[in-house]
Amino acid sequence: MFESFRENIRDKTGGKLPFEDTGIKIRAYFSQITEKKQMGSDLLFMVTYMASIISADITRPEIFAYTATRQEYTASKYIAKVETFVKRWNYNYAKALEMVAERTQNPMLSSMLSRYGNSISSGVPDDEFLLLELSTVRSVYRNHFEQGIEMLKKWGDAYIALMLSATIVSVIIMVSIAIYAPDDLDSTLNTSYLLIIGIAVFGIGTMYSAIPGDPKCHGIPSQGSYEQKMIRRMEYFILPILIITSILLIAGGFNIGLVFLLAGILLAPLGLFAIIDDSNIIGRDEDFSVFIRSIGTIMGGKGLTVTYALAEIDIKPLKRLSEFIQSVYSKLNLGLDENMVWERFIDESGSNLISKYLNIFRDSIKLGGSPSEVAKVVSSSMLEQTLLREKREMLATGFIVLLIPMHVAMIAIFVFLYQILLSMSHAVTAVMASFEQASVAMSDSTTSVGGSMSGMVNIFVNFPEDKMGIYVAIVVLIITIANIMAGKIVKGGANYLYYAFGSILFTLTGLVFIVTPFIVSMLFQIPSFEAV
C-alpha cells in the first residue's frame, strides 16, 4: 500500500518525493560529520595496518588489496576506490591516488593519499614511505586530538555559562509572568522553550564537533564484555518499566520530582555497570600495549609460536588483562581453534582498540611479517591513543566535577523561585479574600483603604499555577537531558554512559523537586493579615 502511494506521489511530482533532495542533503551532512570524527583514529588504524603488513615483504598490489578489504576502517573505502581505478581502468597507483585525493573532502586523508602518490612517483620504496607516514599520521592525530581537547575545555566552560544564562532567562520569564500575567501566555512559554533548546543544541553541537572520535567499545553485535552484556539484558525490562511507570505517575498527578527520582533509581544499575565497564576498558587498553609488545618480542626473539610465547609472559603486572590472557593460554593449550580463541578474547574484552590492533597483529603474522617489528608498530600506535585518552579523562573529570554541582544549582534556583512565587501567590490570594470580606462589613473609608491595598498586591493573584508547574517541569527536563548529553560527549566512550549520567542527574533533580517545598515552607513564612 505504501509503495503504491509513494509511486503515485512520484508520478505527480516529476519522479521525486517532496523534500527528497533535502533529506538526502541532511543525511549526507550528518554522514560527513560522523566520518570527520572517525577519520582521525581510523586513518591511524589503516596506516598502522599497512605499515605492519609491509614487514611481510608483500607487493604493492597486495598492500592495497588487503587494505581495501578492511571495512572496519572508514578510510579503507578510499583505498578501494584506488583499487578500482587501477584494476578496472588501468591507471597506475600514483595517478589513482592523486585522483582519489582530489575527490576526498577530508583534508587529513587527502593529504596522506597525495603524499603516497608523490612517493610512488618519486620511486620511494613502500616500506620506507609507510613507516615514515605512520610517524606523520601519529603526529597529525596527536596534534588534532590535543587541539580538540583544548577546544573542548573552552567550550565546556562556555556551555556551563550558556546553560546558567538560559536558566536565568527562564527565571526572569517566570517572574515576569507572575507580575504582569500576559494574555498570550502560551506564546511566551513556547518562546522560552525554543530559546533553551537552541542554547543547549548550540553548546552540545559545538562540543561534539570539537573533539575527534574515540570509540572505546568494539560494538560487535550481540558480543561484548560481561558488563556490556548485562546492560543489554537489563535494558529490555528496565526501560519499559521506566516508561510505563513514569506515564502512570504523571497521569496520576504525582509530584514530578517522584518521576525524576524514579528514573534515576531505575537507571542506577545500568549506570553502575556502564561506569565499571568504562573503567575496565581503559585499564585493558593500557595493559594491551604492553602485552602485544611483549608477546611480539618473545615470538621474534625466541622463534616461538603464540602458545609457547604466552607461557613466557609475566602477566602479573597486567592486572586488568591477566585473566583474559590466562584464558587464551588455557584454550590454546587444549588445542582449540586459534581464530575462535582470539575472537572470544576480543569479544570479552569489549575494547575497540584491542579489537583493531590485535587483528592487525594477527593478520600481519599470518602474511609472514616479523612478530617483533609488527608488535613494535602496533604497540606504539596504541600507546599513542591511550596516552591521549588519559588527557581527555583528566579534562572530563574536571568538567563533570563542575557540571554536577552546577546542575543542582541551576535546578535549585529555578525550582526554589517557583515555590516562593507559588507561596506568595497563595498568601496574596488569601489576603485579597480577607480584604473583600472586610470591605462588606466596614465603612466606606475603610473600604477605600482596602481597595488601594488590593491594587498594590493584585500582581500575584493571577499567577497561572498549573501552566507554570508544567513550564518548570519541561524546562528542568530540557536542562537535565542537555547536561546528560554534555557529560557523555566530554567523557567519550560508549552510549551506555548516558545511563550513568542520567542516573546521577535525574536522581539529584528529583531530590531537589521533592525537598524544595519543605525548605521553602520552613524558611519563607509569609504572614497572613486578618481583617481589621
Image: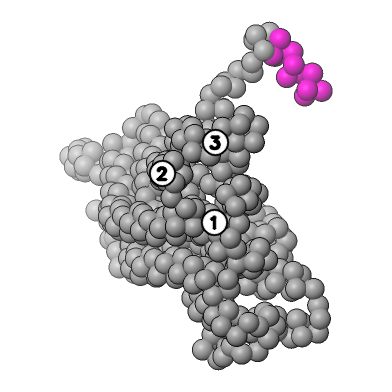
Evaluate whether residue 41 shows in this view: no
Membership of 217 in magenta stretch: no
Q: CA distance from mark 3 to mark 1?
A: 19 Å
* Residue numbers of the magenta segment: 1-11
Q: CA distance from mark 2 to mark 1?
A: 19 Å
Quadrant assignment for the N terminus: top right
Q: Secondary structure at mark 3?
A: loop
Residue type highlighted by circle 2: Ser
Residue 528, picture quadrant? bottom left
Q: Secondary structure at mark 2?
A: helix
Q: How crowded is the residue under tag 3: few (<14 C-alpha within 10 Å), some, or many (20+)?
A: some
Residue 258, picture quadrant? bottom right
> Which residue is tagged 1?
50
> Which residue is tagged 3?
92
Residue 419 position, x and y percent, is 37, 56
Q: Nearer the viewer, residue 14 or 433?
A: 14
Residue 154 position, x and y percent, is 27, 55
Indicate which disc residue 122 carries.
2
Q: Nearer the viewer, residue 414 or 404?
A: 404
Q: On the picture, is 444 further left or further right than 263?
A: left
| Foreground disc of the pair 2, 1 | 2
Q: Is 30 drawn above or below residue 528 in the view shown? A: above
Q: Is 62 drawn above or below residue 215 in the view shown? A: above
Residue 409 position, x and y percent, is 33, 62
Residue type highlighted by circle 1: Met
Q: Main secondary structure of the magenta part?
A: helix
